[in-house]
Amino acid sequence: MFDTSFTWNDFLYLLDGAWVTLQLTFWAILLGSCVGLLCGLLRALLPRATLPLSWVLDVFRSVPLLIQFVLFNSFKSIAGIDISAFAVGCIVLGIYAAAYFTEIVRSGVLSVPFNLRRASRSLGLSYLQDLRYIVLPMATRVAFPGWLNLVLSVMKDSALVMWIGIVELLRASQTIVTRIQEPLLVLCIAGLIYYVMSLVVARLGARLERRWQEND
Amino acid sequence: MIEIDNVYKSFGALEVIKGVSLTVNKGEVVSIIGGSGSGKSTLLMCINGLESINSGSIRVDGTEVHAPGTNINKLRQKIGIVFQQWNAFPHLTVLENVMLAPRKVLGLSKQDAEAMAVKQLTHVGLADKLKVFPGKLSGGQQQRMAIARALAMSPDYMLFDEATSALDPQLVGEVLDTMRLLAEDGMTMVLVTHEIRFARDVSDRVAFFRNGLVHEIGTPEQVIGNPQQPETIDFLKSIN
């Protein structure tokens, strides 16, 4: 028969970890979306002036996330900045997400046909009104699937914060594995929890997209 | 009144308008005909400041379009333009397409903007399509919506840039009918068009453009009925 030392308390411990994962993802995506939106707009609208910005963001897209976590965490200690490891996790993940989101926003904005912008300006809309009422709504529809992908990948990449001492879902599962020595079962359960969290996000996104598609 | 005075315009090394002067009086319908690359569409874009000019001047009701201090957004309120590609905003319904500028630019209330939009859409025969998204409309319907969208700003001038060129032949008539009604209402219009018969019917004057210049200008009877310049005769022959 199926025999395990995995207890209800272990499961609750995993859920605690999952809650940390969700919080990390939420703050990182919030930060990443705000910064990425701003940077993406600047990159699309002022491509020449903001070229150096793209070099900076390329660093965050190119260096492995794990290295970024460890380096930033060490820097924090050396510089004597007094913030929690959780805050470090949110900031590093957030900047990482921002670097990717910048490109997603940029391609969304550039996908709006020049002629449509010209048409809106011809009606007397100002540059900012054109951005707000024409460019951003249309770009959102293009950028949204990419943003959703980003949310899902940040949720999973957040597991790397265990290297700076944060107990999230994956770290919690490893603690349990060490104690009860049933890696397959524990990892299956942890994987299932990741899957359910991702599924909810993906489903909510799909519903929103469907509503837009009905209009087009 | 639109006063175009000795305007030059080039895109990089390519000079497309080479000293055009043309005056369009209030209530007048002026058609611009000519081969592609003759600078006629570019001139329309210059009139409402969508394109810059290199030298010369364009004044609309006395306001210099390209002067640095000109409030171009304000000026554009009275110059409607309809493009070859109708440029419907795909994320807005037909009604919202037409309401947007009256609400955001003129600052009308929702009710007033909607009343204006419904009036203009009824005028162009789209009263039954208010809640529809443009993607569901035919090209002709989208173009009529674009005309209603421009008219909802109550412009004093309407510019048409080959408004029927991208339409299927069977849809051209409905758009021309809409434009004809507008001309009969006394709207001041500048049309760039390849519909020679239509130009002859509705225009007060016709200008034949060639190589970035007004090559021949006069009443439709003169320019289309009895052209004097050999190039005009050749052009009219070539499109008939």
Image (spheres, grey):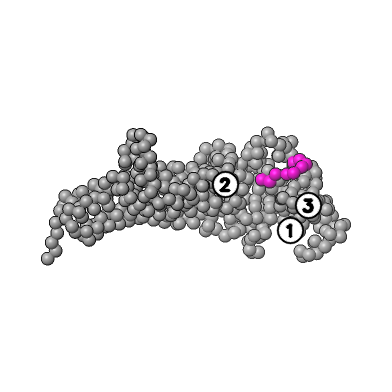
Mark 3 falls within which chain?
A: B
Residue matched to label 1: B36
Mark 1 falls within which chain?
A: B
State how far apart marks 3 and 2 are (Cα).
33 Å
Mark 1 falls on what kind of element?
loop
First of labels 1, 3 by sequence position: 1
Picture residue at 36% right of the left edge, 53% below the top: A152
Picture residue at 27% right of the left edge, 48% below the top: A168
- Magenta range is B50-58
- Whether labels 1 and 3 belong to a single chain: the reply is yes
Residue matched to label 3: B212
Foreground of the two, A62 or B38: A62
Mark 2 falls on what kind of element?
loop
State how far apart marks 1 and 3 are (Cα).
10 Å
Q: Which amino acid does label 1 sit on?
A: Ser
Picture residue at 78% right of the left edge, 65% below the top: B238
Foreground of the two, B147 or A11: A11
Residue matched to label 2: A47
Mark 2 falls within which chain?
A: A
Crowding around mark 1 (Cα neighbors within 10 Å: few <14, some 14 to 19, many 20+) is few
